Image: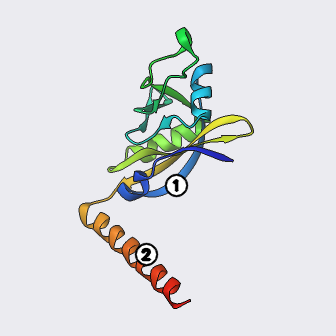
């Protein structure tokens, strides 16, 4: 598996409870652009509309050699998942505070896949706690390096 794009803010802003692997419907030039690493998941989110799963806000830069075949970089893209899984997800999303956040985009067996996380938003004090833990971890690592 080769990771092509990652949403680093997702784990900082959300408590990720479950992860799901989905396929994504893309045009030919979008695949080429993603393989070059020109995809951005920062402001993106997934939503269920009429029983289908869609990815909003994912920016895939136009392919340089794509001329007329390039599409809008911010267009809404359909995600592929089994009906049963979508229905189960829909039930969980109706609970207050849950959202679907794209965690990463990667290649698996030559196909582009998106890893979605079912997350609950963190409050400000939770984010501060996360920062404090990372800071303490960094200090410990630094102390271990100095001792050796």
Determine whether, in the image, residue 99 is placed left or right of residue 147: left
Picture quarter with the C terminus: bottom right
Horizontal side, residue 93 vs residue 21: left or right:
left
User: Is 141 located above or below residue 99 in the figure?
Assistant: below
**For marks 2 and 1 on the same chain, the one whose residue lies earlier in the sequence:** 1
Which one is in front, 51 or 15?
15
Q: Label 1: which residue? A: 18
The image shows residue 133 at horizontal and vertical percentages of 38, 74
Helix, strand or loop under label 2: helix
State whether residue 90 appears in this view: yes
> As rendered, which of 136 and 119 lies closer to the eye?
136
Q: Quadrant of residue 47?
A: top left
Residue at image x 46%, y 48%? 7
Q: Residues within 10 Å of mark 2 (few under 14, many from 20)?
A: few
- Which numbered circle lies on residue 103? none
Cα separation, mark 2 vs mark 1, equals 27 Å
The residue nearer to you, when weighing 79 against 86, is: 79
Crowd class of label 1 (few under 14; some 14 to 19; many from 20; radius 10 Å):
few
Disc 2: which residue = 138
**Which residue is most to the right?**
109
Which residue is located at x 30 percent, y 66 percent?
126
Task: Locate residue 75: give its quadrant.
Answer: top left
Q: Position of residue 38 (x, y in %)?
A: 52, 34
């Amino acid at each position: 598996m080769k990771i092509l794009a990652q949403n680093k803010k997702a784990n900082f802003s959300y408590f990720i409870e479950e992860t799901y692997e989905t396929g994504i419907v893309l045009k030919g030039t979008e695949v080429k652009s993603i393989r070059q690493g020109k995809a951005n998941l920062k402001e993106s989110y997934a939503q269920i509309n009429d029983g289908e799963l869609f990815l909003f806000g994912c920016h895939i830069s136009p392919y340089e050699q794509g001329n007329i075949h390039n599409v809008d970089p911010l267009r809404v893209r359909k995600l592929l998942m089994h009906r049963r899984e979508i229905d189960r997800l829909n039930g969980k999303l109706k609970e207050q505070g849950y959202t679907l956040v794209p965690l990463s985009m990667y290649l698996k067996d030559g196909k582009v896949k998106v890893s979605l996380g079912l997350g609950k938003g963190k409050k400000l004090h939770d984010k501060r706690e996360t920062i404090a833990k990372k800071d303490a971890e960094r200090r410990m690592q630094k102390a271990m390096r100095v001792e050796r």
